[in-house]
Amino acid sequence: MDFHDRYTWAEILFGDRRYTLAAKELESLLADVAAEQTPVRGLGEARQLLARAHFHAAHLVRAEETAREILADNPVDAYAALLLYRSLERQSRHEEAARARTLAAVLGAPGMSWEDDEDTSDASDRATD
């Protein structure tokens, strides 16, 4: 199978909620592409799907690592920032998660906004008064 077929297969696995299998296929696919050193379009999407698969499979450290790799290559990837935030939050790493949440909000990640950050901080300030 070529890159596209393998990526499509991983999408099918993900859609069927077979997240661990999707992650394995994507890891293998990305390793093969790296070994061939051949430029391939769509690697960013494959890496993002890998991060999502790890997150949904509760492989939170792997999801975090993949999201950080994506952000290292593309610091304005809002969805990678969101995945990083959620992965850190689920690991109860709240201080790091707060920084990632701010980044996700700044980048305009789905469901994130500055107003939410301001409302949350105002509410917690009022709750402690």
Image (cartoon, grey):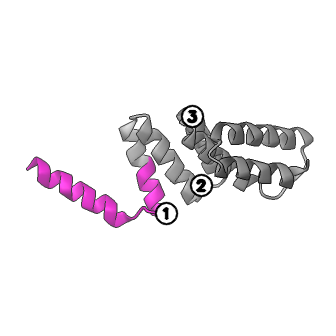
x and y percent of residue 119 in the render?
Answer: 26, 62
Mark toward the viewer: 2 or 3: 3
| Mark 3 vs mark 1, CA separation in Å | 22 Å
Quadrant of the rendered image containing residue 33: top right
User: Of marks 3 and 1, which one's residue comes earlier in the chain?
Assistant: 3
Q: Quick one: SS at disc 3?
A: loop
Q: Which residue lies furthest to the left in this view?
A: 129
Q: Name the residue under label 3.
A: 59
Q: Residue at x 24, y 55 (%)?
A: 121
Judge from the rendering whether residue 89 lies leftward or rightward of residue 26; answer left or right.
Answer: left
**On the image, numbered disc 1 is attached to which residue?**
110
Residue 48 shows up from this direction: no
Amino acid type at image mark 2: Pro
Residue 75, which numbered label?
Answer: 2
Residue 59 drawn above or below residue 4: above
Seen from the viewer's position, the closer of residues 15 and 69 is 15
Q: Nearer the viewer, mark 2 or mark 1?
A: 1
Mark 3 residue type: His
Circle 1 Cα neighbour tier, 10 Å, few/some/many (<14 / 14–19 / ≥20): few
Task: Give yes or no for residue 66 being in the magenta stretch.
Answer: no
Disc 2 and disc 3 in contact, CB within 8 angstroms: no
Q: What stretch is highlighted in magenta?
A: 100-129
